[in-house]
């Protein structure tokens, strides 16, 4: 197959967006939830943590399940379950406890989405387009925050937050239509293996090290998606303006992932340098975010979205490019790291915001991104290009 598999790509993006929508809608509509179901900042952190920790536990085993049952069955199960979770939150979330229980169920479902989407794309994506394709695929999660941010001024503040959750379930029929129209056959990936593109398969230990880096870097995503609205209001923005900033920031993150993928393809890189640069730059941005307000705050937040949350596509590309025979199982390990970081992050950052300051939270994220950048480069030094000595080192 030649060209870009747009229909398959749209399917991958939408399944991830639908699965992630419950937790990001909770963050975006927090101020409404706070008033109606008495959800506190700490409660928000706990609920978000439960979602991602559950996904982290489920992801590795679900990745192996996807390899066994196929990505089509996995997407069918995931899409229906995710839509039901959204409707259940809209109908039955009457307290912080009931919301948390539903988010735990949503987290278990979410652990299936990324391995299925990665496997669906891996069987159609030519090596010279992998960076772009996985950059576009990972637009799915910021698309969730984009939709969540847009839902604040257009739906949550007009007809109510419950309606916003119910509307999210409308992605289900779109996904099923795309799935029924997809009849593409897998390409012969062996015919594309070249010395400047392929890498020797990474070991479980190496992938686990990347998962650690991903977990630390995910704290930036947690900070931006879960606590941004309240931080923006504290930085002199209106509630509607804060929702709009979340929307525009998500667009910036999407753009950064695509651009990073294009550059990786053109450089025929294995992705490590791109990962380290984005994480390292994000560390610097979060380091100067403390104390900013007004337009300065807005500009830094947009830059934080572009760097601190612009790396996930490259992470998946790096793993799948090296382990193309087991894309679901291998990428599920780094995805588990992402989920673990997203689970621990809300607890730590929520506690810091409530007991120390927002500035302490930004500083913690800065340090986490810095460590992630160093770990990524360290892993790069232990892997090699295939065959040895060919292509780019990083």
Image (cartoon, rainbow, N blue to C red):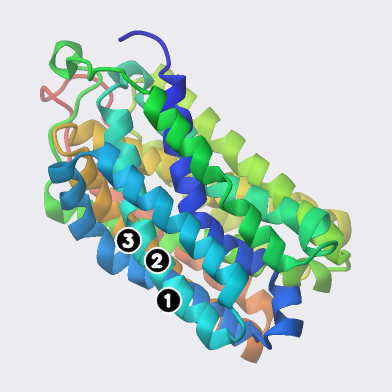
Can the viewer see residue 275?
yes
Please, is residue 230 above or below residue 170 in the view?
below
Left or right, 117 with respect to 86, comes to left
Q: Which residue is mark 1?
A: 50
Q: Identify the residue at horizontal 54%, vertical 62% (top origin).
A: 86
Which quadrant is the N terminus positioned in? top left
Q: Identify the residue at horizontal 30%, vertical 43% (top origin).
A: 116
Q: Nearer the viewer, mark 2 or mark 3?
A: 2
Q: Nearer the viewer, mark 1 or mark 3?
A: 1
Can the viewer see residue 297?
no
Q: Which residue is mark 2?
A: 107
How far separated are the C-alphas under marks 2 and 3?
14 Å
How far separated are the C-alphas under marks 2 and 1?
7 Å
Left or right, 68 with respect to 369, comes to left
Please, is residue 88 above or below residue 142 in the view?
below
Are discs 2 and 1 less than 8 Å apart at CB?
Answer: yes
Secondary structure of the residue carrying tag 3 is helix
Within-10-Å neighbours for mark 2: few <14, some 14–19, many 20+? many
Q: Which residue is mark 3?
A: 337
- Residue 156 position, x and y percent, is 77, 63
The disc placed on residue 187 is: none
- Residue 122 position, x and y percent, is 27, 29
Please, is residue 121 above or below residue 361 in the view?
above
Secondary structure of the residue carrying tag 1 is helix
Q: Earlier in the sequence, mark 2 or mark 3?
A: 2
Secondary structure of the residue carrying tag 2 is helix
- Residue 221 position, x and y percent, is 54, 59
């Amino acid at each position: 197959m030649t060209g870009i598999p747009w229909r398959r790509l749209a399917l991958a993006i939408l399944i991830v967006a639908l699965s992630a929508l419950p937790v990001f809608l909770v963050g975006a509509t927090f101020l409404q939830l706070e008033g109606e179901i008495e959800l506190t900042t700490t409660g928000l952190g706990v609920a978000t943590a439960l979602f991602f920790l559950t996904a982290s536990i489920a992801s590795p085993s679900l990745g192996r399940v996807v390899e066994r049952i196929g990505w089509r069955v996995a997407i069918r199960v995931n899409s229906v379950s995710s839509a039901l979770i959204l409707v259940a939150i809209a109908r039955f979330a009457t307290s912080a406890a009931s919301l948390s229980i539903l988010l735990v169920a949503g987290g278990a479902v979410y652990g299936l989405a990324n391995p299925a989407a990665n496997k669906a794309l891996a069987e159609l994506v030519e090596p010279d387009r992998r960076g772009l394709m996985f950059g576009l695929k990972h637009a799915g999660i910021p698309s969730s925050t984009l939709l969540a941010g847009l839902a604040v001024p257009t739906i949550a503040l007009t007809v109510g937050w419950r309606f916003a959750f119910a509307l999210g379930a409308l992605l289900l029929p779109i996904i099923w239509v795309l799935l029924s129209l997809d009849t593409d056959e897998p390409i012969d990936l062996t015919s594309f293996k070249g010395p400047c593109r392929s890498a020797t398969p990474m070991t479980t230990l190496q992938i686990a090290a990347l998962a650690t880096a991903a977990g630390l870097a995910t704290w930036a995503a947690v900070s931006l998606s879960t606590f941004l609205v309240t931080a923006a209001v504290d930085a002199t923005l209106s509630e509607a303006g804060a929702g709009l900033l979340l929307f525009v920031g998500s667009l910036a993150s999407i753009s950064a992932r695509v651009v990073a993928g294009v550059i990786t393809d053109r450089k025929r890189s294995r992705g490590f340098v791109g990962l380290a640069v984005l994480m390292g730059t994000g560390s610097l941005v979060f380091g100067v975010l403390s104390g900013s307000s007004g337009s300065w705050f807005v500009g830094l937040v947009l830059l934080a979205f572009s760097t601190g949350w612009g790396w996930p596509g490259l992470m998946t590309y790096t793993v799948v490019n090296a382990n193309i025979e087991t894309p679901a199982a291998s990428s599920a390990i780094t995805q588990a790291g992402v989920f673990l970081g997203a689970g621990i992050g809300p607890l730590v950052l929520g506690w810091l915001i409530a007991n120390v300051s927002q500035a302490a939270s930004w500083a913690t994220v800065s340090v986490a991104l810095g460590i992630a950048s160093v770990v990524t480069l360290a892993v790069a030094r232990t892997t090699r290009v295939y065959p040895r000595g060919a292509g780019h080192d990083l």
